[in-house]
Image (cartoon, rainbow, N blue to C red):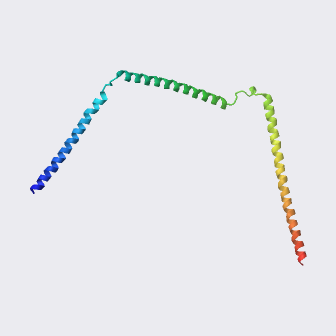
Amino acid sequence: SFQESCKNQDDEHFLIARYASRLAADGAAAVRQPITKTRVPADISLCLDSNKQQRQLIAELENKNKEILQEIQRLRQQHEEASQPPLDKSQQNPTLLAELRLLRQRKEELEQRMSSLQDSRRELMVQLEQLMLLLKEEELKRAVSLRV
């Protein structure tokens, strides 16, 4: 029983020591952090130089951004102008309009011709099938008559 009480006390002492060391470590970390955040750099000119370079870089990037935005706006305007039909039909070239009308008329004529040729082809295919059937019938009749 004496040994058990000594062991319990040792366990308690160990736990207390561990807890105290953890508190000390947490406290030391809390004390160190504010110091590192507020610490002044050894060479202040390097810090100012870096700050100046950052401001210059920001200014350059802002200028580049402005140029890109202007280019985007210009391209959008070009696209809108290109996609809109001309406002006045009289501005179009009358020769081109006449040629366009003739080409459309010729296209319709060719499409009609192609349609009639396709119809003729279908009719010829039907006639060919009928002739093939007649030929086969004749061949069968000959074959049967030769066997007899």
Q: Which residue is most to the front? A: 43
Closer to us: 3 or 72:
3
Number of on-image labels: 0
Q: Give how far across and how far down residue 48 sits, in percent.
A: 38, 21
Closer to us: 80 or 87:
80
Q: Give how far across and how far down residue 55 sits, in percent.
A: 44, 23
The answer to whether residue 119 is left or right of residue 25 is right
Residue sitting at x 38%, y 23%: 46
Closer to us: 40 or 72:
40
Q: Which residue is most to the bottom? A: 148
The answer to whether residue 70 is left or right of residue 93 is left
Q: Quadrant of residue 143?
A: bottom right
Q: In this view, does 100 lie above or below 114?
A: above
Q: Is residue 31 above or below residue 7?
A: above
Residue sitting at x 75%, y 26%: 90
Q: Give how far across and how far down residue 71 sits, in percent.
A: 58, 27
Q: Give how far across and how far down residue 2 sits, in percent.
A: 9, 55
Residue sitting at x 19%, y 47%: 15
Q: Quadrant of residue 141?
A: bottom right
Quarter occupied by the N terminus: bottom left
The answer to whether residue 86 is left or right of residue 30 is right
Quarter occupied by the C terminus: bottom right
Residue sitting at x 16%, y 49%: 12
The answer to whether residue 60 is left or right of residue 15 is right
